[in-house]
């Protein structure tokens, strides 16, 4: 049993985002709890209290206690005391890696606990099989996609066989196939009687697994639903609460095809390829044409080459070969660099300043505070304009990076998973801003696993598999059927 008793918390130097106010919650042993709510409501803070990162790692003003089985006060003991009982999978898997290769990462926790070599080998064999990650073994951590890193993070925690698992948005960077595998892993843990606490925005894959749903708002528990009560929640009401769909939902474009405005000019790629230093080719596109002015969804499974594709398009990869032609003009790498803006999958790599407002201002060719504040308002960030970006929640950081892209005057803007960690309402806000950018004549490339974002704003698609473009097209019956199959939206 886990008990949160009269918990209140405020991060040191923060502006209230992610804090908690007088929270009480009891989680029974073997129970699966889904924590949900809009970005910044305090979900991640709850997970950090349960696994002991607060107060052992994150400073702040804390009152109340977190108690396991009536005896272990998590917030009063060092982290190593709880390490064997509580395993954590973070939203950003890079933050929990200690090694440079996958095999060592899986073995690391067990080695730290001094387990016999034979037992470690046995656990690794079973874990690799359970997570279906055979092809990821013996790989460099740095050459994995975001979704592949998340799989390794989950597997490394499973190696320790803890009684309690804490997941902080584990599906945020996963493709549909990987989410199915994650669901299966959670199902097995549940069957084994493990206690699971899952903070999530993507809810549909947890249907039938969660015993209770804790809906949070502004640092408080607004309501606790049983699984049956949450199942019956009206779709319109759920959207009003800022929640993603819980059940299956058909992929329907928000705008009619006739209303889609796509330029006649093209971005043309010819004999486009990229290889690692080892010589392994990971991208090869014989020819591909994308309309200027489109909002193009770059889709495919984890590790297909999507992020490599857009990094090459932005001129970030020196060893990329082939030609890029825009409006009939050949563009060399340096020109691509000057004409493109990239919002990275891990936005922590591109947040540099001391405040959210400054992040927007440095993206402007001619800084204008009034315009910057208007952008922040459109993304629900104005109240945090003086906050340090590193004090924000994951979703708020994502929107801050998007604000910088909106402020830039680049011709082509690339977003790598822009709605990772975003709730329904903020996903809609991002989609609206992407449409505004398109209306200004910008060409947008969106690497995404988010079918709801695709339905809201995308009007062209590039499907990549094993480094090759299998198909590219706008909305029509054929592309709709392809997307339906890929995202496995079969309807009820």
Image: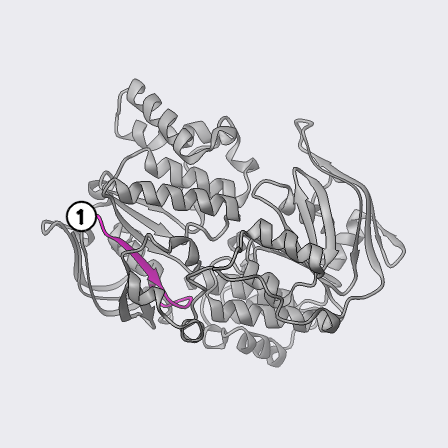
Q: Nearer the viewer, residue 179 or 397?
A: 179
Image position of 321 with respect to 353: above or below = above
Q: Quadrant of residue 478?
A: bottom right
Q: Position of residue 259 (x, y in %)?
A: 73, 73
Q: Nearer the viewer, residue 184 or 196?
A: 184
**Left or right: where does residue 388 sit relative to residue 210?**
right
SS at mark 1 in the image: loop
> Can you see residue 213?
no
Type of colouring: one colour
Q: Position of residue 285 (x, y in %)?
A: 76, 41
Image position of 142 with respect to 206: above or below = above
Which range of residues does the magenta coloring cover? 30-42
**Left or right: where does residue 449 sit relative to residue 61?**
right
Q: Position of residue 358 (x, y in %)?
A: 55, 69
Image position of 346 with respect to 419: above or below = above
Question: In this view, which residue lies farthest toward the right?
Answer: 328
Residue for point 56% across, 58% down? 451
Residue under pointer 1: 77
Q: Is 40 colored magenta in this rendering?
A: yes
Question: In this view, which residue lies farthest toward the bottom?
Answer: 370
Crowd class of label 1 (few under 14; some 14 to 19; many from 20; radius 10 Å) = few
Residue for point 32% across, 64% down? 11
Q: Is 170 colored magenta in this rendering?
A: no
Q: Position of residue 140 (x, y in %)?
A: 53, 31
Q: Quadrant of residue 367?
A: bottom right
Residue for point 50% across, 48% down? 174
Magenta segment, principal secondary structure? loop
């Amino acid at each position: 049993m886990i008990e949160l008793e009269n918990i209140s918390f405020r991060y040191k130097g923060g502006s209230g985002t992610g804090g908690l106010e007088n929270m009480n919650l009891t989680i029974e042993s073997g129970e699966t709890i889904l924590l949900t709510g809009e970005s910044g409501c305090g979900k991640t803070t709850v997970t950090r209290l349960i696994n002991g990162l607060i107060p052992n790692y994150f400073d702040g003003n804390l009152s109340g206690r977190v108690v396991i089985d009536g005896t272990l006060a998590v917030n009063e003991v060092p982290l190593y005391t709880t390490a064997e009982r509580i395993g954590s999978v973070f939203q950003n898997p890079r933050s929990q890696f200690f090694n440079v290769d996958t095999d060592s990462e899986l073995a690391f926790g067990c080695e730290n606990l001094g387990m016999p070599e034979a037992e470690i080998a046995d656990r690794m064999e079973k874990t690799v099989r359970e997570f279906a990650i055979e092809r990821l073994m013996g790989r460099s951590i740095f050459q994995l996609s975001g979704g592949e890193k998340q799989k390794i993070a989950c597997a490394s925690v499973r190696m320790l066989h803890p009684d309690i698992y804490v997941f902080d948005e584990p599906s945020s960077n996963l493709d549909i196939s990987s989410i199915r595998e994650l669901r299966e892993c959670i199902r097995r843990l549940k069957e084994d009687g493990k206690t699971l606490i899952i903070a999530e925005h993507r809810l549909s894959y947890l249907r039938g697994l969660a015993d209770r749903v804790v809906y949070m708002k502004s640092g408080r528990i607004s309501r606790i639903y049983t699984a049956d009560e949450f199942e019956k929640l009206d779709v319109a009401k759920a959207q009003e609460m800022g929640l993603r769909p819980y059940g299956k939902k058909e992929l329907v474009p928000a705008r009619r095809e006739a209303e889609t405005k796509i330029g006649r000019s093209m971005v043309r790629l010819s004999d486009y390829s990229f290889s690692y230093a080892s010589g392994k080719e990971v991208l090869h596109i014989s020819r591909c044409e994308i309309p200027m002015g489109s909002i193009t969804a770059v889709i495919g499974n984890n590790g297909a080459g999507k992020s490599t594709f857009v990094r090459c398009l932005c001129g970030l990869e020196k060893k990329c070969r082939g030609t890029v032609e825009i409006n009939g003009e050949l563009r060399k790498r340096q020109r691509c660099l000057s004409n493109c803006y990239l919002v990275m999958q891990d936005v922590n790599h591109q947040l540099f300043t001391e405040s959210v407002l400054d992040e927007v201002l440095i993206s402007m060719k001619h800084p204008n505070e009034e315009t910057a504040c208007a952008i922040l308002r459109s993304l629900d960030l104005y109240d945090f304009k003086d906050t340090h970006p590193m004090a924000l929640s994951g979703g708020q950081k994502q929107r801050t990076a998007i604000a910088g892209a909106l402020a830039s005057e680049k011709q082509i803007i690339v977003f790598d998973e822009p709605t990772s960690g975003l709730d329904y309402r903020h996903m809609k806000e991002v989609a609206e801003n992407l449409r505004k950018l398109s209306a200004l004549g910008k060409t947008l490339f969106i690497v995404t696993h988010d079918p709801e974002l695709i339905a809201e704003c995308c009007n062209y698609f590039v499907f990549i598999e094993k480094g090759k473009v299998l198909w590219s097209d706008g909305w029509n019956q054929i592309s709709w059927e392809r997307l339906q199959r890929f995202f496995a939206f079969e309807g009820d």
